[in-house]
Image: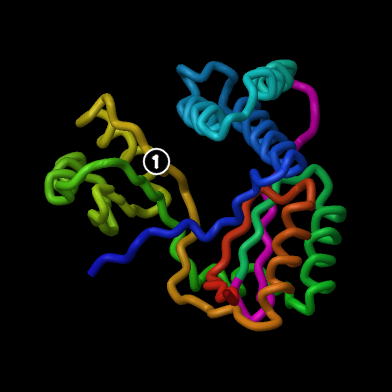
Amino acid sequence: MGRKFEVRKVAMAKTQGAKTKVYSKYGKEIYVCAKNGGVDPQANLALRRLMDKAKKDQVPSHVIEKAIEKASGGAGEDFVPARYEGFGPGGCMVIVDCLTDNNNRTITDVRNCFTKTNSKIGAPGAVAHMFDHQAVFSFKGDDEDAVLEILMEADVDVTEVECEDGMITVYAPHTEFNSTRTALTAANPDIEFEVDEITFLPQTETVVSGDDVAVFDKFMDMLNDCDDVQDIYHNATVERGE
């Protein structure tokens, strides 16, 4: 029994300010990836994938090059991942992923977003167990059985393969991201991924409606305005009035 794939992440490229935020997000991720795994994208596959993704999201080349140049210098900030979980407006579940060089600043900023929208930040693991940490790939195609056979022959631990509206979507445990991508690319070198990422998929949905909708929007906007926030995942299905 399939499920239609929805990335419940907050889209950020609506205004010029939001674009700047997207550029900053990619710049930080590329810097960390290059610093930890090397600046050569041919040797650092994670870096190459991140660069391709940034270009697809129309991040200027100079932003990418500056991040790699900064990483090659060896100095600079030491960013570490930080994850915060809790319950947002309407009781929806939220995961906030950050990259930070100052944990005190980041937790203060994120907690402020929860507090000012009558939301509740929780302890680590408070809601993550209600999400599946999955690698997701989506690309054009109509034969899910053939795709499943390719992945099984490559010994990839697939969660699910489904086809809808001329698109194949593959779900696999997040630890299988590289092996899944490698198997799909080896079988079809010309494959173009609409989606190829590691994400959190909610196991249940929470309807956010009425007065909670405006508060939910404010909550998401506040989180996006935090410099250290990289990704926001939630299980909200927002019911907006006509």
Task: Quickly name the residue at label 1.
Answer: 194
Residue under the point 42% across and 51% down = 174
What are the residue bounds of the magenta stretch?
A: 74-93
The picture places residue 71, in percent across and down from the top left corner, at 69, 22
In the image shown, does 57 or 68 lie closer to the viewer?
57
The answer to whether one can see residue 34 in this image is yes
Residue under the point 60% across and 31% down = 33
Residue 151 on the magenta span: no
In the figure, 143 relative to 94: above or below? above
The picture places residue 109, in percent across and down from the top left corner, at 83, 58
Which of the image's four quarters has the N terminus?
bottom left
Name the amino acid type tagged 1. Glu
The picture places residue 133, in percent across and down from the top left corner, at 46, 58
In the figure, 61 relative to 170: above or below? above
The answer to whether one can see residue 88 in this image is no
Left or right: 10 in relation to 49: right
Left or right: 146 in relation to 124: left
Residue under the point 34% across and 62% down = 4
Q: Quadrant of residue 196?
A: top left
